[in-house]
Image: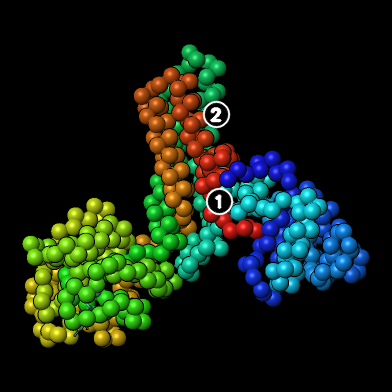
Amino acid sequence: MSYDLNRSDTICALATPPGRSALAIVRVSGANAYTYRDKLFTAHRGVVKDYVATLGLLSTPDSGEHIDECLVTSFPEGRSYTGEALVEFSLHGNPNLVRILVRDLQSLGCRSAEPGEFTMRSVLTGKRDLLKAQAVYDLIEAESERALKVAASNLHGQPTNSIARARKAVISVLAEIEARLDYPDEELGDTLTQQLREDLGKAQEVIEELIASAAWGGRLMSGIRVVLFGPPNAGKSTLMNALLGEERAIVHSSAGTTRDMLEAKFELQGFSITLVDVAGVRFGDDVHDIEAVGVEKALAALERADLILALDPSDKPMGAKHPIYDWPNPQGRRILKIQSKADLVTEPTRQLDTLYDFKLSATDKNSLAELRSKMSAILELESNSSSALTSAHQEQELKHTQVALEQALQALDSAMPLEILSAEIRNAGYRFDRLTGDSLSEDVLNQVFTRFCLGK
Ligand SMILES: Nc1nc2c(ncn2[C@@H]2O[C@H](COP(=O)(O)OP(=O)(O)OP(=O)(O)O)[C@@H](O)[C@H]2O)c(=O)[nH]1
Ligand SMILES: [Mg+2]
């Protein structure tokens, strides 16, 4: 998709979901928004004031035929969502009415907006930076209360402020270097080098904190993956159904019931959780073909898990031979070891007790409640920051920024010539600009805005 970076057109789009509804909002943004409004809309009282919802008649430009009575709200250039002149038509929610209005706007010269183009324009006019633009997207897409809170905090500018602080430190370092470039014989000196190193170090700390929170932010948005893992017949599918509160997975007394991977979403204390049920895992010569495929899928599911519930049945405990111990856990995922079907044994052995986080009986409401609160306590611990960058694109840009800062520090430490040092620090500055949107290239635009819905 190619975006109109010059904002030469006036754009329009339906901003509410398509289909029949009480109301529909059509937005128009750009230099001609007010002109188009005046060709289509006549206020009952004759005047249309900025910011004031005004009732009037909507008519087609050629015939003058009235098509609806609607409300119009106008926002002048510089004081609107996009930073351009913006008009919102709030009409009755009939898709045919919307089609007529959009067609009439197009006949006057308006262009249909691309997804995210209104928000993109707000970045181009300096109304908000790219981080806040992403927060707008997240606020619309957030699937849980926690995700909403993070999006709201990002929109309020928490990451924007910390990145601005880090960027300022980098710019001040650049200014020092540039000032000395004019006097190439002068050396930086130990005290100043130390000062510059500290400034770059502060910027690095900010970026590292943001990287650490970005992985979590992404999971908050897309749903935290909790995988039920264990040998066949451990009670995984039963637990899935119990946590969901519905009979989603097939449960049977024979081992090997679940073959495929099953996913379902549910909300836990404001977190959106994707619960994943997999085939029971066992190894050995008697594992036949289809079963082996299921085992492979189960192990692959572990790689993408954020939290693993490793079930070991009390009636046939595997203890230290549980398949979870065969998995290397490369990313150090949190594992909750559960002694399942606890109702089947009255006195679990001491040895068993030390291996498990707790005992669970899927039929016992109390032990389910205990599991729920344990899971949310773990997630709570992870979400120690109220704001976190959320998109994979941002995480990638943060990592590039981290590398650029690292290279700048290395250049400083190895007393590189000032020209090289300046180039390295400039590169770090450029990376900051990509994060905030001060440097808007085609690839950044495509990464950020193509996922937006129309009219936003
Ligand atoms: N007594 C008791 N039985 C349970 C409990 N949880 C599950 N079961 C029973 O154990 C059997 C196996 O349960 P499933 O949930 O199908 O086990 P699974 O781990 O999904 O098994 P596979 O899909 O074959 O790997 C069923 O007969 C369940 O009713 C429990 O907490 N207590
Ligand atoms: Mg199962």
Please state which of residues 314 and 381 is positioned toward the viewer in this rendering.
Answer: 314
Q: Amino acid at mark 1?
A: Thr
- Please tell me in which quadrant of the rendered image residue 291 appears: bottom left
Find numbered disc 2 in the image and state the secondary structure of the residue it sits on.
Answer: helix
Check disc 1: other Cα within 10 Å, few if <14, some if 14-19, many if 20+. Answer: some
Report the disc number at residue 49: none
Report the disc number at residue 175: 2
Left or right, 195 with reference to 93: left
Residue positioned 15% across, 59% down in the render: 326
Identify the mark nearer the N-term, 2 or 1: 2
Residue 432 shows up from this direction: yes
Left or right, 438 with reference to 342: right
Q: Foreground mark, 2 or 1?
A: 1
Residue 49 shows up from this direction: no
Left or right, 295 with reference to 131: left
Q: Residue furthest right?
A: 46
Q: Which residue is mark 1?
A: 450
- Please tell me in which quadrant of the rendered image residue 280 appears: bottom left
Where is residue 243? Give x, y as percent.
33, 78
Find numbered disc 1 in the image and state the secondary structure of the residue it sits on.
Answer: loop
Taking 411 as reference, is 354 above or below it? below
Residue positioned 25% across, 86% down in the render: 363
Q: Amino acid at mark 2?
A: Ala
Q: Is mark 2 within 8 Å of ligand 2?
A: no
Check disc 2: other Cα within 10 Å, few if <14, some if 14-19, many if 20+. Answer: some
Q: Residue furthest top?
A: 185
Residue positioned 78% across, 50% down in the render: 109
